[in-house]
Amino acid sequence: MNRRVKGIVWGVILVILALYPWLFGIYFTNVIVTCAIFALFAVSYNLLLGYTGLFSFGHAMFFGAGGYATALALTHIEGCPLLVALLFGFLGAVALALLLSPIVARLAHSAFAMLHLAFSMLMYTLALKLRGITGGEDGIGGFPIPPFRIPGVVSVDMTDPLNFYYFAMAVLGGSLWVAWFLTKTPFGQIIVSVRDNAKRVDYMGFKVPQTKAIIYTLSCGFAGIAGSIYAMFQDLISAASFGIAQSFAPIVMTMVGGVISFFGPIWGAVIFAVIEELTTRYTERVQLVEGLILIIVILFFPGGFIHLAAIVKGKWLGFIRGQWFGSIKGKWFGKQ
């Protein structure tokens, strides 16, 4: 698509998102906020898997770190501003990533994946045992959600679901744009090169471990933002945020949506939100249905939804062009 068409498409999307609460009500508004949170979570994971080739089984610990950092700030810092609480979530995940990056930045493949699984289980255990800080199994909840305030300009009540919707979508959408822009920079090309041929990148003079550490920290920071918004949206964060199920969520969304594209994990989050919404109306075995869909995708569409959509689009365009060419040929050359 050319720039004009892209501008029209994005304009229509923004208008739909702006009018969404008024068109579909509070229930489906909450559904789309949850979907957007996990879309950013999945995109942050794909910066590691799809762009850098680093497979992790423990990305949820950064999601949980962001949520806990925000919850603790809002619980213990009286009058903590909303954006400062969000910043705490981002910095909490980044701090954990900086602590681990000297160890994990030199690893790859199964060692990288399994070490993150171990660290994630460690964080889960600590969240359960340190009840005085984390609340144990009950987690931290009921903390105040401060208004969005610009001194002398505006103060918006964030306990209003409509106001929080616009705030969350602005933060999540802005974070997604920053992540997308990152992939289009020269640094984005370097991390793809690290994925494809780390030895050649090193030979060209780029420091591979340091490059991995930077993208690793940024990826974890985006996961922390998703966790922070999630904690404020639910008004609760618990040890389950560090669990295996939470770590597998972005993996599954990325695989179903498509690792090959930046927008693949976003589509994966949308697909699973729709599946969960439809499945829960008939059965409680949502994870079974999601697992079957993942198996089908891996067996028959390993490129995910994005790849499948590209194939369908190519065949459709080929059919249309064939029909058009056939009609022209029949019209002008049929009598000969």
Image: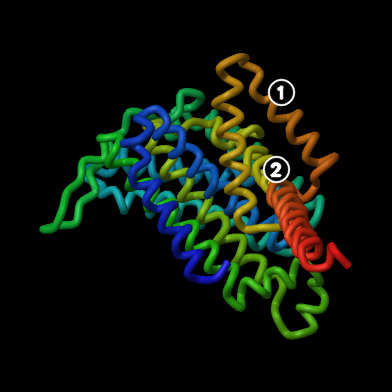
Tell me if residue 326 can be seen. yes
Q: Identify which residue, 231 or 324, lies in the foreground.
A: 324
Q: Amino acid at mark 1?
A: Leu
Residue 82 spot, x, y in % from top left: 29, 48
Residue 282 on image: x %, y % = 60, 14
Residue occupying the far right of the picture? 336
Left or right for 79, reference 191: left
> Which residue is disc 1 drawn over?
288
Q: Which mark is residue 256?
A: 2
Number of on-image labels: 2
First in residue order: circle 2 vs circle 1: 2
Question: Which residue: 51% across, 52% down?
Answer: 93
User: Is residue 98 in sight in this rendering?
Assistant: no
Amino acid carrying mark 2 in the image: Val
Q: Residues within 10 Å of mark 2 (few under 14, many from 20)?
A: many
Q: Residue at x 43, y 34 (%)?
A: 133
For mark 1, does the 10 Å Cα neighbourhood hold few (<14), some (14 to 19), or many (20 or more) residues? few
Q: Quadrant of the rendered structure where residue 299 is?
A: top right
Q: Confirm or deny contact between disc 2 and disc 1 (CB under 8 A).
A: no
Which structural element holds mark 2? helix
